[in-house]
Image (cartoon, rainbow, N blue to C red):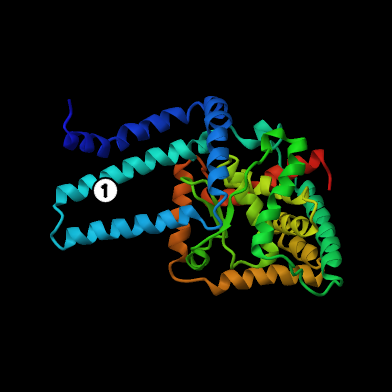
Amino acid sequence: MFSPKIGRWLLAISFVPLYFLVQWLREYPEFIETYYSNGFYRFWSQGIRYVLGRFPISIGDLLYIVVIVWGFIRIRKHFKGKTPVRSLLLFVGTAVSLLYLLFNLSWGLNYHRISLQKSLELNTTSKDSMALFNLTKDLILRANTLQLKLANDTKNGVSVPYTTKEILEKGIQGYKVLEKKYPSLTYHHEAVKKSLFAWPLSYMGYAGYLNPFTLEAQVNQKIPAYRLPVVATHEMAHQLGYASERDTNFIGYLAGIHHPDQYFNYASTTLALSYCLRDVYRESPKRQQEFIALLNPGVLKNFQESNRFWETYQNPLSPYFESIFNRFLKMNNQAQGVKSYGQIIQLLLAYHAQYPL
């Protein structure tokens, strides 16, 4: 039999075979889709959300705090000469191996499932400039109409009358409607919470995130309230097992436009419009200015509100945070990295070719 010490060293170096196992599995997305994403993960995620959703505070954020403090104490002991180098290496190796195993078992293999456009049977093979321009005009009309209804005039930005807690509780209503069209997007047992790290998240440029170990969705409650509904539905899409940022942006958009609440409709419409306007600029900066001129002043005020918020938290480390996240996405089967967020345009054009606004 192995001694406990040998067992710990084997665990510490197990990262290497685990890594190659995941690299092998990623070559079989249909297998992952069937047996992991729509099999094990579906039951696991619903169960853990059912339990942790009962707590008003983010358990995952609390665990992060505990792990960070514990790790700091162990490393501090080493530099004070109380922990041998071999013990520190054993500790780090074991922690990395366990975290990698738990990450992939709990959620990470979803990065390697089949693409959303394939499962929803959307044709994303072509990108037509005229279709982009037409969709942009339709979104402008919809954004202007919603802004006028919600603000009662064209000049003022939309102010959401709900608390953050109420917004997070309402997110599931959009999925209840959406599941009638796409049963695979059925959502049960909410676990969407305010993050304990809203301040650092703002400086890092994050509006929200999914904890891959506890499967709680966290939103940055500091961001402008009009944007919170679509951030919530985006993070809920991650909870359903969709890892691609393009896919979750699109699912969050769908949940928002199908939502019975017009504040959710507005948040999703303006999000899609912002991505369309970026792509229009690549086609023709002049055309983008023509479209912007069609927006109600109130819609522009909301866009400016978001821009001012993120500009407030710009700092010298922002490019490094973005670079780290970009590398993380590329390591996990998202070749475009952070640019994958903007690839929602392909899905928007394909979807609205079938279902016009």
Number of numbered discs overlaid on the protein picture? 1
Q: Position of residue 159 (x, y in %)?
A: 74, 70
User: For the residue marked with disc 1, what is the amino acid?
Assistant: Val
Neighbourhood count class around disc 1 (C-alpha, 10 Å): few under 14, some 14–19, many 20 upward: some
- Which one is nearer the viewer's eye here, 285 or 325? 325
Q: Quadrant of the N terminus?
A: top left
Q: Residue at x 84, y 48 (%)?
A: 357
Question: Is residue 259 something that shows in the picture?
Answer: yes
Above or below residue 168? Residue 95 is above
Q: Position of residue 49 (x, y in %)?
A: 56, 44
Q: Position of residue 88 (x, y in %)?
A: 20, 50
Relative to 319, is 285 on the left or the right? right
Q: Residue at x 14, y 58 (%)?
A: 82
Query: Residue 272 is drawn in which quadrant?
Result: bottom right
Relative to 106, is 161 on the left or the right? right
Q: Position of residue 296 (x, y in %)?
A: 82, 69
- Which one is nearer the viewer's eye here, 353 or 15? 15
Query: Residue 276 is drawn in which quadrant?
Result: bottom right
Relative to 335, is 141 on the left or the right? right
Above or below residue 72? Residue 48 is above
Above or below residue 357? Residue 287 is below
Give the residue number, with chain letter if any, for mark 1: 92
Q: Secondary structure at mark 1?
A: helix
Question: Is residue 254 something that shows in the picture?
Answer: no
